[in-house]
Image: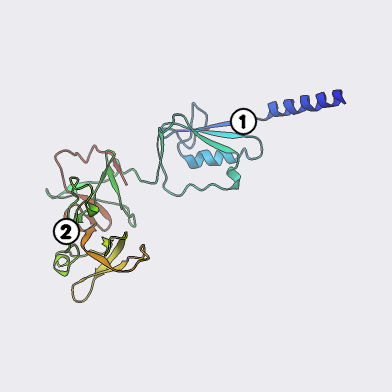
Amino acid sequence: MKSFVQTVVTLTITCLACVHAAEIHVSPVGKDSNSGTRAAPFQTLSAARDAARKHLGKGPVTVHVADGVYYLPETLVFTAADSGTTYQADHEGAAVISGGFDFTGGLDWKTDGKIWQAPTPKGFLIDQLFINGKRQHMARYPNYDPNQPTAAYQGFAADAFSTERGAKWADPTGSYIHAMHAHLWGGYHYHITGKNPDGSVAYEGGWQNNRQMGMHPNFRMVENIFEELDARVSGSTTRRPTRFISFRTVRLIH
C-alpha cells in the first residue's frame, strides 16, 4: 500500500509539472499581428483574449497587461471560454481601460476666430470630452462655477429652459435639462426633443425619481446647447478657443 501511495503522489506531481502555464502579453504600443510574447505583445485586449482562448483546457493562462491606456471601440465580452484566464497589470494602477475614443491628431480643426469646430464621424455621439486629461464641461446655462462646490450643479437658474431663453436656441434637440426634485429628494434628468408650437422647450424624461412631484422652481440647468457658447453641433465637436490650448498638439479623448 505504501508503495502504491508513493507511486500515485509521484505521478500527480509529475503531471502537474507538465501543465503548461501560458503567458500572453499586451501593450498599447504592441500590434495585434504580433505573437503576444513579452518582446512582441498584442495591442488590444480583445486580441489577447482571443489568443488566451486557444489554450482553453490546456492549463492556466496569464495575460500580462502593460502600462498605458486601452481604448475599447466596442464592448469587451468574456464568456465561459475565458474561464481560467488571469489578467494581471504589470504595475498596479498603471494600466487603464477606457470606453473613450482617442481623437488626437484625427480631427480637422477650423475656427472663425470665436469658436473651434471639427467634424466627427457620422452618428458619433459625444457626451464627454477630455483635453490633456482634464474633463471639459458641455455648453451650459448657467455656466459651471468651480467656486460653488456645494451649489446645485455648481450653477443653477430658474429660467434655465424658459420660453424666453429657448427663443435664442436655433435647435436644442439632443440637449439636456437637469433639475432637483421640488422638495430636494434627489433630482431629474430630461432629454430635450425640440420646441413646441408655442415656442416652449419640449422635453421627455424625469423617470429617475419615483417621487414624481415636479422640478424645483430654481435649481435647474441646461447643457449641450450651441448658443450657450461651449457647445456641440450635430456631427461635430465644438469648443471656444483659449490661449492656453493648441488644438494641433493636445490629446483629445471622448
Mark 1 Cα-neighbour bin, 10 Å: few <14, some 14–19, many ≥20: few
The percent position of residue 190, horizontal first and vertical second, equals: 30, 63
In this view, the residue in front, 15 or 146, is 146
Quadrant containing the N terminus is top right
Please determine whether, in this image, residue 2 is positioned above or below residue 61. Answer: above
Q: Picture quarter containing residue 249? A: top left
> Secondary structure under badge 1?
loop
Among all residues in the image, which is located at the extreme bottom?
197
In this view, the residue in front, 233 or 61, is 61
Numbered mark located on residue 74 in the image: none
157 left or right of 125 in image: left
Mark 2 Cα-neighbour bin, 10 Å: few <14, some 14–19, many ≥20: some
Per the model, the C-alpha gap separating discs 2 and 1 is 59 Å
Q: Could you tell me which residue is drawn at 59 percent across and 31 percent down?
A: 22
Please determine whether, in this image, residue 223 is positioned above or below residue 113. Answer: below
Q: Could you tell me which residue is drawn at 65 percent across and 35 percent down?
A: 59
Callout 1 amino acid = Ala
Residue that label 2 marks: 227
Callout 2 amino acid = Glu
The percent position of residue 48, horizontal first and vertical second, equals: 52, 38
Which is nearer the N-term, disc 2 or disc 1? 1
Please determine whether, in this image, residue 12 is positioned above or below residue 161. Answer: above
> Secondary structure under badge 2?
helix
Q: Could you tell me which residue is drawn at 14 percent across and 39 percent down?
A: 243
8 left or right of 93 in image: right
Among all residues in the image, which is located at the extreme right?
1
Residue that label 1 marks: 21
